[in-house]
Amino acid sequence: MKNIIFIAPPAAGKGTISDILVKDYNYEHLSTGDLLREEIKSGSSFGQEINDIISKGELVSDEIVIKLVTEKLNFLKDKAFILDGFPRTLNQAIKLDEMLITLGVTNNLVAYLDIDLDTALKRVLGRVICPKCKRSYNVYNEGLKPKNENICDDCNVLLEKRSDDTEETFKVRFNSYLENVNPIIEYYKEKGIYKSFLANGDPKELAVNIIKEANND
Ligand code: AP5
Ligand code: MG
């Protein structure tokens, strides 16, 4: 099974599809957004700096996220893993290649999840997340609602909103994502490992389509 590198705009469903692939196909999941939010929760001054950036919808520096991913990838190199939210700049993509070569990891699929701003905005305004397992729910979608209002199905804790899930911040995040992504797409197209998927259907069907591609040698 290939490793899956998600490059997709905010709220395209990277976290949701990753949860399905972890539960049903045994993937390991590495989300830079989740790692950064953990740092914020720790209450450190570094976390406060990160919070100021994320709350404005801006990108954290390449240096910080590359360091975070380098540390974690060492533990994942012998497993099938998902990278969610990394790379987000061409520089990060180039650095990721260097890391993967050093670790001897060669079997990768870059999956782009294609979504428009209006659909993504609606999703983000309905999103609530579990602070413990990080699962994303959606109060506007019957299939993605928690069973009990505002409680995680798996962890039984109160669900939360993300500080960057406001309409204003979301539009900044979405547009800045699109500004950065084209060179990354071209980079992976040239390597022949890029595939785009429509992200506005059923999440389980989308996960199955991605797995078919990840199993395709
Ligand atoms: P990050 O946490 O990665 O946020 P993001 O990329 O903006 O993506 P999201 O987590 O918002 O969306 P998602 O695609 O995971 O969607 P989800 O599955 O939750 O990053 C946050 C911030 O950290 C960045 O803005 C940046 O500041 C910083 N950062 C992170 N990585 C960085 C990097 N590499 N470099 C620099 N800075 C970095 O789904 C969204 C909602 O839709 C949910 O409610 C879900 O239930 C629902 N949903 C999902 N799929 C469907 C479906 N098919 N149909 C209907 N609803 C659906
Ligand atoms: Mg996410």
Image: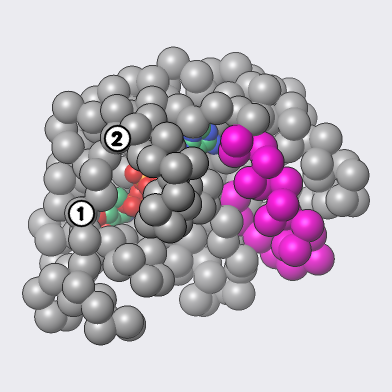
Determine whether, in the image, residue 140 is placed left or right of residue 172.
Answer: left
Query: Does 65 appear in magenta?
Result: yes
Q: Residue at x 73, y 62 (%)?
A: 76
**Kind of residue at badge 1:** Lys
| Residue 55 circle label | 2
The image shows residue 128 at horizontal and vertical percentages of 21, 59
Q: Residue at x 37, y 71 (%)?
A: 132
Quadrant containing the C terminus in the rendered view: bottom right
The image shows residue 115 at horizontal and vertical percentages of 33, 36
Give neighbour class at mark 1: few <14, some 14-19, many 20+ (Cα, 10 Å): some
**Kind of residue at badge 2:** Ser
Q: Which residue is mark 1?
A: 161
Viewer-nearest residue: 214 or 151: 151
Determine whether, in the image, residue 112 is placed left or right of residue 141.
Answer: right
Query: Does 94 appear in magenta?
Result: no
Q: Residue at x 23, y 29 (%)?
A: 169
Which residues make up the magenta segment? 64-83
Q: Main secondary structure of the magenta part?
A: helix
